[in-house]
Amino acid sequence: MIQLYHLTKVYNGRKVALNDVSFKVDEGEFVFIAGPSGAGKTTLIKLIMCEERASQGQILVDRLNLQRIKPNKIPYLRRKIGVIFQDFKLIPTRTVFQNVALRLEVQGAKRSFINKKVRVILKNVGLEGLGEALPPQLSGGEQQRVVIARAMIGDPLILLADEPTGNLDIDLSRNILNLLLDINKGGTTVLMATHNQEILQETNKRVIRLDQGRLVA
C-alpha cells in the first residue's frame, strides 16, 4: 500500500529531514512511526500526502509513484488518504457537522447523502448529539474525534495520523488509539506518528523508529 525506497528530504539545500529511509506498509496494516521531535515523522507524512516532494528516492502509494505524479492528479490521490493532525485544524466558526461534511461538499456529493453519512460517522466516533456544537465548545478529546470523523468521511484507503494523542492525557490517548484500531479492523491502512512510549506499549503493532531523519529500527 505504501512503499518507500531510499527516501531523502533536504530543506534549503542544508537541513536533512529524512536520510535514505526505506520501508513498506502492507494493505490493512497498522504501523507506528516513532521517534523524538525532529526525527522526521511529520515530514514523512507530508511526503506521503504530496504536501512536500522528496529530494531523492521514490514513494509509491497504492501503486502510484509520487515522484512522477502530475499536479492535477494530486487531489485524486488525496481522496484515498485521510489525515489526522495534532493541532486539529478545525474551522472554529463552523459546527461539528459542517467541519465533517466539508470534504463531501467539496467533492459535490448530494445533500441527502452528506446528511446521512455525517450522522453515521459522528455516531461511530462517539459524537452523536454534538453535531451542532462549535469546536471551541468541545474538550480536546472531543475535538480530536471530530478530526478523525473528518478524515474518515471519504472512506479513505489510508489514514495518516500525525501525533493524534500529543495534546491529550494518557486516558484520552488510549481512547483515541482504540478508535484508530477499530478503524484499522475495518480494513483501513493506518500509519500513526507518535513519540509517546506509553501508547507504543499498548499494542503489538509494528513500530518503525526514526532518529534525526534516519530509520534506526
Image (cartoon, rainbow, N blue to C red):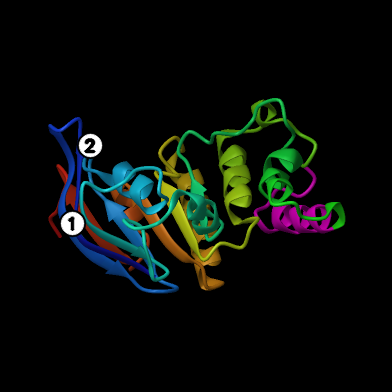
Q: Is residue 157 left or right of residue 19?
A: right
Q: Secondary structure at mark 1?
A: strand
Q: Earlier in the sequence, mark 1 or mark 2?
A: 1
The main secondary structure of the magenta stretch is helix
Q: At x 36% / y 73%, what residue is drawn?
A: 26
Type of the residue with mark 2: Gly
The image shows residue 196 at horizontal and vertical percentages of: 32, 46
Q: Is residue 184 left or right of residue 12?
A: right
For the residue pair 147 and 112, the one nearer the viewer reads as 112
The image shows residue 18 at horizontal and vertical percentages of: 19, 46
Type of the residue with mark 1: Val
Point out the image quarter for the C terminus.
bottom left
The residues colored magenta run 113-130
Foreground mark, 1 or 2, reads: 1
The image shows residue 12 at horizontal and vertical percentages of: 20, 30
For the residue pair 129 and 59, the one nearer the viewer reads as 59
Point out the image quarter for the N terminus.
bottom left
Q: At x 71% / y 25%, what residue is drawn?
A: 93
Is residue 114 found inside the magenta-colored segment of the image?
A: yes
Q: Residues within 10 Å of mark 2 (few under 14, many from 20)?
A: some
CA–CA distance in space, label 1 to label 2: 15 Å
Is residue 122 found inside the magenta-colored segment of the image?
A: yes
Q: Are marks 1 and 2 in contact (CB under 8 Å)?
A: no
Quick check: can you spot residue 25?
yes
Query: Which residue has dot 2 on it?
Result: 38
Q: At x 73% / y 55%, what residue is drawn?
A: 123
As drawn, the label of residue 21 is: 1
Above or below, 11 relative to 22: above
Q: Secondary structure at mark 2?
A: loop
Above or below, 14 relative to 63: above
Residue found at the far right of this picture: 112
